[in-house]
């Protein structure tokens, strides 16, 4: 299920130091990050690797929900340009979902590769957005999905950076 941030709702639980650290990044939508990571299960996580895995799972689930929305849109009649744009977004989302799953396995052994693999997703989604805009596709749900997946990418990039820093400290 896709979590939507709502600034009016108080956070369900107090964010942990680790969650605050992840949500403090420059490229992070802080409200979204805190809303998503202040669930009892996220706050209970003290290990950055486990939090990274949770973020990747949430990103993949969000990607899957958005991919389903793209697949539904493709079934509706539209222009050839719109169909082409939607299909390019479907491919971007399949890639993003696979990458989120792959990054989960890389977090322990190779945070640097995990960081790279999550960071290269942003241009894919940007290309998808551009294709939708250029084809004049009217679908707020898809644009929201794109915005949210970018938030998860930024959060994934942040947690992998934290893990990378820890890994460097452990090697010195």
Image (cartoon, grey):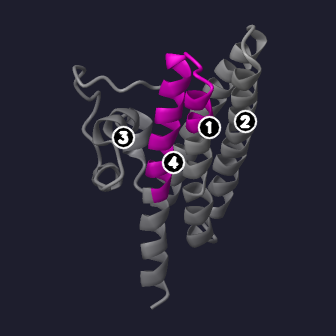
Question: Which quadrant: the C terminus?
Answer: bottom left
CB under 8 Å between discs 1 and 2: yes
Query: Label 2: which residue?
Result: 88
Residue 128 tag number: 1
Dominant secondary structure of the residues highlighted in magenta in the image:
helix
Q: How far apart are the alpha carbons under marks 4 and 2?
A: 19 Å
* Badge 3 or badge 4: first in the primary sequence: 3
Label of residue 81 in the image: none
Disc nearer the start of the sequence (4/2):
2
Q: Which residue is mark 3?
A: 33
Q: Secondary structure at mark 2?
A: helix
Marks 4 and 2: CB-CB under 8 Å? no
Q: CA distance from mark 3 to mark 1?
A: 23 Å
Counting other residues with Cα less than 10 Å from the Cα at mark 3, is it few (<14), some (14-19), or many (20 or more)? Answer: many
Sequence order check, earlier mark of 1 and 2: 2
- Cα distance between the residues tagged 1 and 2: 6 Å
Q: Nearer the viewer, mark 2 or mark 3?
A: 2
- The answer to whether the residues at label 3 and label 4 have Cβ atoms under 8 Å apart is no
Sooner in the amino-acid sequence: mark 3 or mark 1 = 3
Helix, strand or loop at label 3? It is helix
- Is residue 115 found left or right of 27 in the rendered image? right
Whichever of callouts 2 and 3 sits on the residue coming sooner in the sequence is 3
Quadrant position of the N terminus in the picture: top right
Q: Earlier in the sequence, mark 4 or mark 1?
A: 1
Residue 80 appears in view = yes
Residue at the spot 63% in from the left edge and 26% down from the top edge: 135
Residue 27 in the image: above or below residue 97: below
Residue identified by numbered label 4: 153
The magenta-colored residue range is 128-157
Looking at the picture, tell me which residue is in the foreground, 141 or 110: 141
Q: Position of residue 154 (x, y in %)?
A: 45, 50
């Amino acid at each position: 299920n896709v979590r939507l941030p709502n600034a009016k709702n108080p956070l369900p639980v107090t964010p942990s130091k680790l969650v605050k650290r992840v949500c403090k990044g420059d490229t992070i939508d802080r409200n979204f990050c805190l809303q998503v990571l202040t669930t009892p299960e996220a706050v209970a996580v003290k290990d950055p690797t486990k939090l990274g895995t949770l973020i990747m799972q949430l990103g993949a689930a969000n990607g899957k929900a958005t991919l389903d929305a793209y697949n539904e849109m493709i079934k509706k009649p539209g222009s050839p340009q719109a169909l082409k744009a939607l299909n390019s977004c479907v491919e971007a989302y399949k890639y993003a979902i696979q990458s989120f799953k792959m990054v989960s396995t890389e977090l322990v052994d190779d945070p640097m590769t995990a960081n790279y693999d999550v960071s290269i997703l942003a241009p894919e989604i940007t290309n998808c957005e551009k294709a939708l805009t250029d084809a004049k596709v009217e679908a707020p749900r898809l644009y929201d999905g794109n915005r949210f997946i970018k938030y998860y990418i930024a959060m994934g990039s942040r947690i992998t950076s934290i893990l990378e820093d820890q890994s460097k400290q452990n090697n010195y």
